[in-house]
């Protein structure tokens, strides 16, 4: 591990008002999103969609790093240029999702464990040679009756820490993503408690596995009520709960925090990021940015619909959503600039 290199990559990913674009949907997830808007679920449609994303004009103004999926890292444009090379030319650092998805955790009904540690060292070395400079591993934590259990939190954070150590050995900055899901009717207070407990356990495990926090990015959920909770909170409440939760659980050495959107609307995700960056400006030990998938891509996917004639309009929407999140990082986002831009 060369910690200077890792620190440099991490700080490039967190630079200025930029953020990350997660375009690493696994095959089942990508196919599900396509099916919802009537797009055929084939390898060629997935390739065409990812080509649309990476060739979006000026995307590098907004996005510092793009997280790819295994299928995508080998793919190229119709002109035969690898997506990895397109990203690099745009000044975007290529990253890669390396977990193998979730399965039921034996003995813990309703809970999941993320797989993918076996053979990971070799896969990381291969991804590095293909141009990736950072990686992502997602663990999911579900809030429900009697869950999450300590057993689930322990197993998932242990796997995240083992993954992070292997990444640093291979010269890749690990993004550690312990996602507390928005599914369910839990309150914001319950989300706060579970998120804090999970992140604290994660940093204990990272310490045990000797991971250098200066070369690591945390990708957490925002602290927010479940989708089915009758009480939804104001933007300021979500922003305050999220930052307070992070302040009590994330060590100051961490290179940065890049949020997932988790099923929030694109506008809500931008508004929450904006509120955090305004209210806590100059008071946080780490920069806060975005690492959204749905909150950047979904409006563009709906415009594209798999039709080549819609590529330009979809790219404009993708750029627009990314730029709204840049504005949120700068503390300049507002509902007004959203609606002005839509006129
Ligand atoms: P969402 O922003 O759609 O939650 O996705 C982020 C991500 O990378 C999930 O692993």
Image: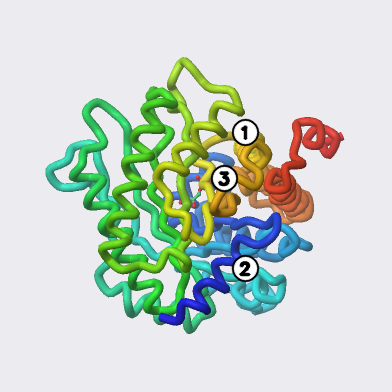
Instruction: Check mark 3 vs ligand 1: CB closer than 8 Å? yes or no.
Output: yes
Q: Camera-side residue: 160 or 292?
A: 160
Disc 3 to disc 1, C-alpha distance: 12 Å
In-image side of 315 versus 220 (left or right): right
Q: Are marks 3 and 1 in contact (CB under 8 Å)?
A: no
| Residue 317 visible in this rendered orientation of the protein | no
Q: CA distance from mark 2 to mark 1?
A: 26 Å
Which residue is labeled 2 in the image? 12
- SS at mark 1? helix
Position of 142 relative to 168 (above/below): above
Viewer-nearest of discs 2 and 1: 2
Examine the rendering and report whether any part of residue 237 can be seen. yes
| Horizontal and vertical percent position of residue 318 | 70, 51
Residue at (29% x, 53% y) in the render: 157
How did the renderer colour the structure? rainbow
For the point 51% across and 21% down, the residue is: 232
For disc 2, the neighbor class at 10 Å (few under 14, some 14 to 19, many from 20) is: some
Q: Nearer the viewer, residue 294 or 268?
A: 268
Q: Name the residue carrying label 3.
A: 294
Report which quarter residue 332 is drawn in.
top right
Residue pictured at 33% horizontal, 80% vertical: 122
Give the quadrant of the N terminus.
Answer: bottom left
Query: Which residue is located at x 52 percent, y 78 percent?
Result: 5
Q: Is residue 16 left or right of residue 35?
A: right
| Position in image of residue 182 (x %, y %) | 43, 33
Q: Is residue 273 above or below residue 42?
A: above
Residue 41: x %, y % from top left: 50, 53
Q: Position of residue 314 (x, y in %)?
A: 73, 50
Q: Earlier in the sequence, mark 2 or mark 1?
A: 2
On residue 268, the disc is: 1
Q: Is residue 227 above or below residue 117?
A: above
Residue 150 appears in which quarter of the rendering?
top left
């Amino acid at each position: 591990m060369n910690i200077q290199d890792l620190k440099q990559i991490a700080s490039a990913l967190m630079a200025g008002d930029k953020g990350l674009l997660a375009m690493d949907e696994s095959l089942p997830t990508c196919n599900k999103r396509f099916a919802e808007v009537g797009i055929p679920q084939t390898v060629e449609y997935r390739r065409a969609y990812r080509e649309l994303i990476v060739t979006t004009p000026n995307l590098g103004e907004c996005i510092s790093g793009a997280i790819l999926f295994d299928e995508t890292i080998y793919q190229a444009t119709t002109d035969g240029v690898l997506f990895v090379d397109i990203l690099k030319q745009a000044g975007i650092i290529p990253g890669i999702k390396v977990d193998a998805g979730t399965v039921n955790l034996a003995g813990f009904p309703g809970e999941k464990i993320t797989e993918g540690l076996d053979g990971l060292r070799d896969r990381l070395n291969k991804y590095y040679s293909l141009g990736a400079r950072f990686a992502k591993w997602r663990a999911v934590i579900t809030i429900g009756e009697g869950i999450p259990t300590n057993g689930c939190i322990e197993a998932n954070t242990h796997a995240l820490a083992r993954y992070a150590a292997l990444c640093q050995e291979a010269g890749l900055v690990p993004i550690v993503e312990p996602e507390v899901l928005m599914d369910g009717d839990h309150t914001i207070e319950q989300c706060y408690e579970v998120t804090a407990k999970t992140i604290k356990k994660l940093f204990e495990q990272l310490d045990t596995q000797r991971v250098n926090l200066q070369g690591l990015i945390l990708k957490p959920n925002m602290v927010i009520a479940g989708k089915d909770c009758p009480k939804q909170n104001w933007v300021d409440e979500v922003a305050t709960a999220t930052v307070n939760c992070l302040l009590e659980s994330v060590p100051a050495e961490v290179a940065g925090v890049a949020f997932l959107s988790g099923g929030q609307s694109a506008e809500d995700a931008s508004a929450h990021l904006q509120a955090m960056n305004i209210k806590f400006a100059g008071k946080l030990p780490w920069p806060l940015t975005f690492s959204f998938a749905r909150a950047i891509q979904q409006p563009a996917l709906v415009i594209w619909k798999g039709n080549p004639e819609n590529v330009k309009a979809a790219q404009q929407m993708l750029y627009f959503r990314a730029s709204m999140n840049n504005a949120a990082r700068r503390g300049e986002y507002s509902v007004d600039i959203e609606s002005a831009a839509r006129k």
